[in-house]
Image (cartoon, rainbow, N blue to C red):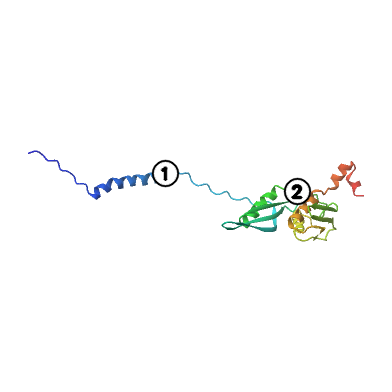
């Protein structure tokens, strides 16, 4: 008698078996890929700034668009080391903390070295910027900082302990700050004046 070949009936279980094997192989390959991936880089730790900072003003900008209102913030920050080095900067962002950080970084790029005469400034000077006008006068030790608002913050961060000041123009924070820095950048020490005149420093004070 001829041997009859037995035909294997295909059942749903036999059809699913190779599919399960393929799926399991794909899962193993995915796991291997995950293991081979490079580890994530750790976020760089922010270094502490050597400068002290003071927030002068925060402004809110609202833009009306088709979908509603979009709000942004701008910040004006002054930084200094208390030893004659001071600077200011501005920053814009969608959040207040981000705007302050940007302003502080911008201020580090605009640092100014202020010539000091003891605890005060070398001479009287008037700074101008736009409609802003700021008068700075030297004062005797013990007077303190006779200034308000933005000017006081700048003087303290610059390390000036005794000074008289008066805002004679616009009181807008940006104008006052820029006018104050205009005055500080035009200050000249005794040695600088003596060098320009070609005389000894002690003769300048006479």
* CB under 8 Å between discs 2 and 1: no
Extreme residue in the top direction: 2
* Residue 59: percent from left, percent from top: 67, 58
For residue 122, side relative to residue 66 (left or right): right
Extreme residue in the right direction: 206
Which mark, residue 89? none
Pick whichever, 59 or 70, lies toward us.
70
| Total count of labels | 2
Extreme residue in the left direction: 1
Pick whichever, 41 or 129, lies toward us.
129
Residue drawn at point x = 26 percent, y = 47 percent: 15
For disc 2, the neighbor class at 10 Å (few under 14, some 14 to 19, many from 20) is some
Secondary structure of the residue carrying numbered label 2: strand
Secondary structure of the residue carrying numbered label 1: helix
Residue identifier under label 2: 112
Report, in whole angstroms, how far the alpha carbon at label 2 lies from the one at label 1: 54 Å
Residue drawn at point x = 22 percent, y = 49 percent: 11
* Occupied quadrant, residue 194: top right
For residue 2, side relative to residue 107 (left or right): left
Which mark, residue 33? 1
Classify 194 as above or below 163.
Answer: above
* Residue 86: percent from left, percent from top: 74, 51
For disc 1, the neighbor class at 10 Å (few under 14, some 14 to 19, many from 20) is few
* Residue 87: percent from left, percent from top: 73, 51
Residue drawn at point x = 84 percent, y = 56 percent: 137
Residue drawn at point x = 81 percent, y = 56 percent: 134
Q: Which badge, 2 or 1, comes first in the chain's sequence?
A: 1
Extreme residue in the front direction: 66
* Residue 98: percent from left, percent from top: 62, 54
Quadrant of the drawing holding the N terminus: top left
């Amino acid at each position: 008698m001829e041997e009859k070949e037995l035909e294997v009936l295909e059942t749903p279980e036999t059809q699913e078996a190779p599919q399960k094997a393929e799926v399991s192989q794909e899962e193993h390959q995915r796991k291997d890929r995950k293991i081979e991936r490079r580890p994530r880089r750790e976020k760089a730790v922010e270094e502490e700034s050597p400068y002290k900072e003071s927030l002068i003003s925060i402004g809110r900008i609202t833009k009306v668009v088709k979908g509603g209102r979009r709000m942004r913030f701008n910040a004006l920050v002054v930084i200094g080391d208390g030893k004659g080095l001071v600077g200011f900067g501005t920053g814009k962002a969608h959040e207040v903390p981000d705007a302050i950080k940007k302003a502080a970084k911008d201020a580090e790029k605009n640092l100014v070295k202020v010539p000091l005469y003891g605890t005060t400034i070398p001479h009287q000077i008037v700074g101008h910027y736009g409609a802003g006008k700021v008068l700075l006068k030297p004062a005797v030790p013990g007077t303190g900082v006779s200034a308000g608002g933005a000017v006081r913050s700048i003087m303290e961060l610059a390390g000036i302990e005794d000074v008289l000041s008066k805002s004679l123009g616009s009181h807008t924070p940006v104008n006052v700050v820029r006018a104050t820095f205009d005055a500080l950048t035009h200050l000249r020490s005794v040695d600088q004046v003596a060098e320009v005149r070609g005389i000894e420093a002690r003769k300048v004070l006479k």
